Image (spheres, rainbow, N blue to C red):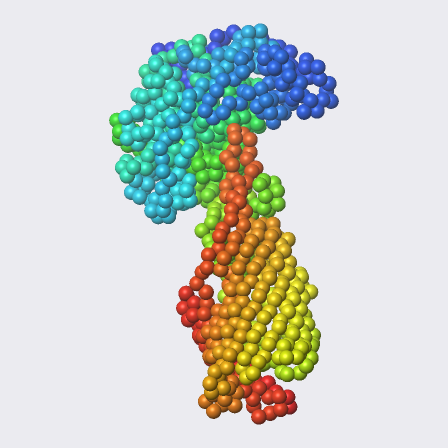
Amino acid sequence: MHLAGGVRGAKVVCVIWSVFRALGLALALCAAGSGAAVAQGNPASLAAFGLSTGASEAEILRALVAAFRADPGSYGAARALLARQSPELLRAYLREIGVLVPASGGTAPANAVVGGAAAPGLGAGAGLGLGLVVAGAALALAGGGEEGDEQDDAARVTIPGSPVTVFDFTVLTGDATSFRTSEYARSTGLDAVGAAERYAAGGQGQGVTIAILDTGIDLAHSEFDGKIDLSNSYSYYGQSDAIADEDGHGTAVAGVAAAARNGSGTQGIAFGSQIVVFRGVPGEEETRDPTSPTVFADALLRSVGAGAAVMNNSWSYVDSGGRARTVADFSSAREVRDFLGSSAIDALDIAVANDLAIVFAASNDSEAEVSITAGLPLFFPRYDGYIIAAVATDTAGQIAGFSNRCGQAMDFCLAAPGISIRTTALNGTTLTASGTSFAAPLVSGAVALLKSQSPELTTPEISQILFDTAQDLGAPGVDAIYGQGMLDVGAALLPQGQLMVYEGEDVAGPATALAETGIIASAPLAAAIGQALDGQALMVGDAYDRGYAIDAGAIVTAAAAPLPDLGAPDQGGEAVQFGVTRARGARDYLSPLDWVEADLRAFSHVALGHGLRLSTEMTTASTAARNGAARLGLQWQGKGESRLRLGLGRIDERGEVLGSAFFGAAGQGGAARTRFIELGGRIGLPARGFLDVTAIQSVTEFSQDGLVTGGEGLRGRAGRVALGARGALGLPGTVVAALSSPLQITSGRLDLSLPQARPAAVGAMRSTGVIRREMSVEVEEAARPIDLTLSYQGGLGLPQGRVALMGGLRFEPSGRTPFLGLQISGRF
């Protein structure tokens, strides 16, 4: 067996792991089949299932599923037919008949033929084709013809798997710098691929299992305490649970992928991941039973049964001279199938259908092409996106001298550090190793990191993200040396493309760019909106529909309450006044009317006698807001300064709420209604003084589509108390000192619909759902601004002349704000 990373220390050598040395054979996870000629059979056809050549995919799927349920022995012919017809249809067929198993493991239907013919013999001295065969493997081979033929004695196939005991791991928090510990620094390669940034973003491998087919693992090593899934690990040598590593290669590979972050030794790139170990790569002393099923095929199925997200393969098939067999040695998929054996291809199909990522080391022969296993998608395009080839770079980021290049596999090939990698060794120690064997587990660990942070992603999506975010090396773009470039998990965590806010429960539904989503909250509503959204998680999606959480409060821009205007003069004593104007006049921002934009105002004042005066006001807006408001007021004026005031009003808004505007996904198509009542009065005081009090209450309700879906019972309050005197300080006008607070919502309920997460992918089924949280937030009264003003209004000695001067302080939790105003008017 050729361990692709068999380069230890600074010495770059290609280590050939061999057995049967007395026979002079260098075995690469291989043993010959019987050597018997493989019988050729007639390919399955549509007619065999009673279908015409014009049958639709739905008709084909129904017929083949019905045939299986009537006769499970039809599986082999159906699978062969669909493999030629459509890989997607094949996956649909496998799901329908139950061959695709859940992550916890399961059993394929009785008589389902997943094994094909044994590998043909290759003759003495040649590289032996099929994967390593051992006693006790669960995948039974069917005898007879090529894959696709009817099988007279169809085999029963079991997907091995036991319930998984999840590794107890708590996600660590901190910024990237906090993860760059001395242990991190000792673990060569982590900083080169931006691992610390991924950790800080929450991706540490948690909840993900990495399968490793290698020489086993040091069970006593502290770096793997509690991390090994012993119930699903398997040994193809001796007892099935004898996974202890006697060679060291598997222990070193496992350390690069997933050694613990425990403050000593080294750590793996996906230190929060669990490991399932398959001891199937031969060291110096292993022997095997050449009549048993293939290790590679069985380990693939066991990886699926164990719920692994990724399988690492730091080994290669080699010829009799110890050179890795590369894609250049094969010219067709049939040759590759004959070399690997149908059972390996069948197992790969099942692994891919269950969304297993499979990483292969490119090998260490300095050749222009990757090993045949690393290049399988060149011959079987259905594996594209599931198999990743890994080449090794040196400490300067250049291709390592010993590493095979990406070659024709450049589109699915990544580079990763592979020289002087410090990692775990036998007897609880560490060592420094070099080779593509140690680049591969960095890539496998990167897959685990992305899966842990974004479980909604499928393997092809993860692969594409790693390819798209890789650092370009060598010739610009994808090239035959470095493929897609240097692995960069730090860049892979960053959102790709424009961030979107999902408006429904499916990523395929409506969505609006985050940059176009927001709320400009007017002062009356700002505190309530802030209470509702601040600290709430809002999930946004990138170009891959990965979910990223932001604070929902970030979409809110709170507008401060405007400072008071100079007051309007008292109404005159004319019996009737009316008018139409585009001016809103003076505002004190106590009334809800002051918060609604309007470009046309009609008003009237009518004396009714006995001191009663009726006033009306109507406003409208011809803008997109389409606001309208009406107010009816009644005032009684007694002797001297005595007055009573009553006002009732209603405001209708479209697209706004008390002047608050909602954009994009925040809110659309909204309608709001506000009703309000004003009560006020004035009493005279000695020395021509007076006390004036105003109180306003409002109730607002609205509904709309978006993140903020509505509000009910939103009660607002405002008030003003003023002391004034006419002719005070010898001045001809009126001096007023006032304490006031503008309108602010103090109670009620806001309804929210916030996207929170994406459901995890199920097998190879891409998740498209959006999990939303529907919630109601009760508004509580918040600290409100208080305005202290001192104003003067008086004549100028001119006809209709008037001067108004005002100054004051606004008190808010954030501090004090002074203000000053001057207005002079008259007729000349």
Q: Where is residue 31 shown, x and y percent of the image?
A: 44, 13
Q: Where is residue 395 shown, x and y percent of the image?
A: 37, 40
In the rendered image of this protein, does residue 401 appear above or below residue 735? above
Viewer-nearest residue: 472 or 552: 552
Viewer-nearest residue: 813 or 128: 813
Viewer-nearest residue: 519 or 745: 745
Res 659 → quadrant = bottom right
Residue for point 34% across, 38% down? 188
Q: Where is residue 248 shown, x and y percent of the image?
A: 32, 25
Residue for point 54% across, 72% down? 680
Task: Specify the quadrant that holds the C terminus.
Answer: bottom right
Task: Specify the quadrant that holds the N terminus.
Answer: top left
Viewer-nearest residue: 220 or 28: 220
Number of marks present in the image shown: 0
Q: Is residue 283 visible?
A: no
Q: Is residue 229 visible?
A: yes
Residue for point 57% across, 27% down? 382
Q: Residue furthest bottom?
A: 797
Q: In screen coordinates, is 501 left or right of 577?
A: left
Q: In screen coordinates, is 51 left or right of 373?
A: right
Q: Where is residue 106 shown, x and y percent of the image?
A: 48, 20
Residue for point 50% across, 35% down? 760
Q: In screen coordinates, is 671 left or right of 248?
A: right
In the rendered image of this protein, does residue 294 appear above or below residue 752? above
